[in-house]
Amino acid sequence: MLTSFLLTLALSQDAHLPPLIPWRGQSEALMQTQGPLLTDFERSLGVDSPNYENTMAYMAKLAQAHGAQFHIVTIGKSDAGRDIRMLLASKEGFTTAKQVAADSKPTLLIQAGIHSGEIDGKDAGFMLLRDIANGARPDILNSVNLLFIPILNVDGHERSSAFNRINQRGPRVMGFRTNGQNLNLNRDYTKLDTPGVRAIANVVNIYQPDLYIDVHVTDGADYQYDITYGYNPDFVSATPKVAQAMDKFVAPIIHARLEEQGHIPGPLVFVMDKMEFSKGLAGWVAGPRYSNGWGELRHLPTILVENHSLKPYKQRVLGTYVLLDGAIEALAKHGKDLAKAVAGSIKEEYTDLVVARGYATEPDYISFKGIAYEHYTSDVTGALEIRYLGKAHEYQKLPVYWQKEVKAKVDIPKAFYIPRQYAQALEVLTIQGVHVDAMTTPVTLPLVQASITSHEFAKAPFEGRFRVTPQLKYAQVNVRLDENWVKVDTNQALGLLATHLLHPDAPDSLLQWGFFHSLFQRTEYVENYALAPYAQQMLSTAPDIKAKYEQKLKDKAFAQDAEARRAWLYQQSPYYDQQYLNYPVLMQY
């Protein structure tokens, strides 16, 4: 039973949030008030979103009403056994991925509910599909195919509450950010630990969409924009041709459509200092653990939508509808132009890859539609706090610090070679769609191997894994490769993604995510009674080792530490584990 305090909160969920600037937009005309396909969102006048059971029921109702052109596909199952479903909409009534991939019309993949408290895309997508089903929008399927996932994180969606997101206006009851195992799906695009993102990888591989839209709701500061969206800009993108095509053919149409319908579209940026907005914006560049960073390395045009959490749910959903409609128009007009840019990006010869970035010390400047704010001392926290005032404030030259600084860049090898026993890593590569070749004819090649000179494990798990940060040195080795090895050639469409997954210096590599933790343990040891006589023999017959040992002994601390001396001598012997701290994935340059 709710306490009186919680009951009061439940009745006024946004009383603690900043005041709103009143909004009325032409997109309000998109909402219907009656009819057999009225959505739960519309029935509630724009404040509610249906639960999983009702969502699946409405999805089935849509398919039944428009069965000739709508087809429901189960693309996976959650950890708790719930179906993850996708609606395929096509003029021809396609039922298979092969049909969609072979069609000349472009395909748009719309994904909602990866963070299931941020569920705007589900209700917007259903309204759009309803308008197709009832004949109001026959133009859409004449021009594009649609793939619509209303809830990707279905288990998190059912961890529903009125109190899941304190800084978000609606819906009145919403799902949770992470899945049933408390994993964030939008940190999983490289490691593929969650059924939801594994399902997405499979959908992208077999349906081959031309544009991928991932709908979120942002946190953070207050500003006038209700719909913000973006992708890694061309000046920091690993695949700039795709970003340039998005700038030219897609974003202008989306932007214009939103403005026409009374929305305020804005750039995908965040705040450098949440206590002092005027210090500027953070131009974040997504890595491949995120949907848009993953799409970038796949040459897949990917838009990350971040609706503004402080705007009312109705306004955000209607803005999402308009954004999706604009993306459809862009694909209808420029699908071939976008596909040409993607093909050119794939054919480009890439020699290196930036794998880590930092914020620039010198900013760019943009005009920005902000909200006025003030500081005050809170009696509750005893600290200086920020208070947004619900009044427009225009910044003429607000600094933006993009992540232009290159912190780590790697040379792209011609190929990687992986021992077969690392089955989990090979499984991830396969699900990602990376082409892997079995070695059939034995061959000896000069390859490069990384050795870990020092490392640090995270002090707490992140996304269910203890990440590791290694320091590495590289050496050339001659290795005989046989049927116990597989080859990953980087001269393939997913060569950039494969490089980030397999190069040990990449922060989203499988090594740093913990797929090779067995390298950090030794399982064979030496007894002192065997080591002392063996070491004596080794030093008397190997002058190079003897010379190194005598040099080491000049270090007084080493000379006085028997354990350190034993450890060093054991490392020089052929009995020492030669795989210990040696990264097993080899590189060919």
Image (tube, grey):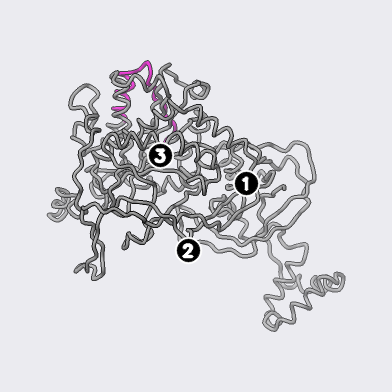
Amino acid type, callout 1: Tyr
Q: Amino acid at mark 2?
A: Lys
- The question of residue 59 being in magenta is answered with yes
Residue 87 shows in the view: yes
Q: Which residue position holds label 2? A: 459
Residue at horizontal 30 percent and vertical 33 percent from the top: 124
Mark 2 neighbour density, 10 Å: few (under 14) some (14–19) many (20 or more): few
Q: Quadrant of residue 525?
A: bottom right
Q: Name the residue at the right extreme.
A: 541
Amino acid at pointer 3? Asp
N-term mark: 3 or 2: 3
Residue at 32% x, 36% y is 258
Q: Which residue position is annotated with label 1?
A: 422
- Quadrant of residue 65 in the image? top left
Q: Earlier in the sequence, mark 3 or mark 1?
A: 3
Q: Nearer the viewer, mark 3 or mark 2?
A: 3
Q: How far apart are the alpha carbons under marks 3 and 2?
A: 31 Å
Q: Which mark is residue 214?
A: 3
Q: Name the mark nearer the viewer: 2 or 1.
A: 2
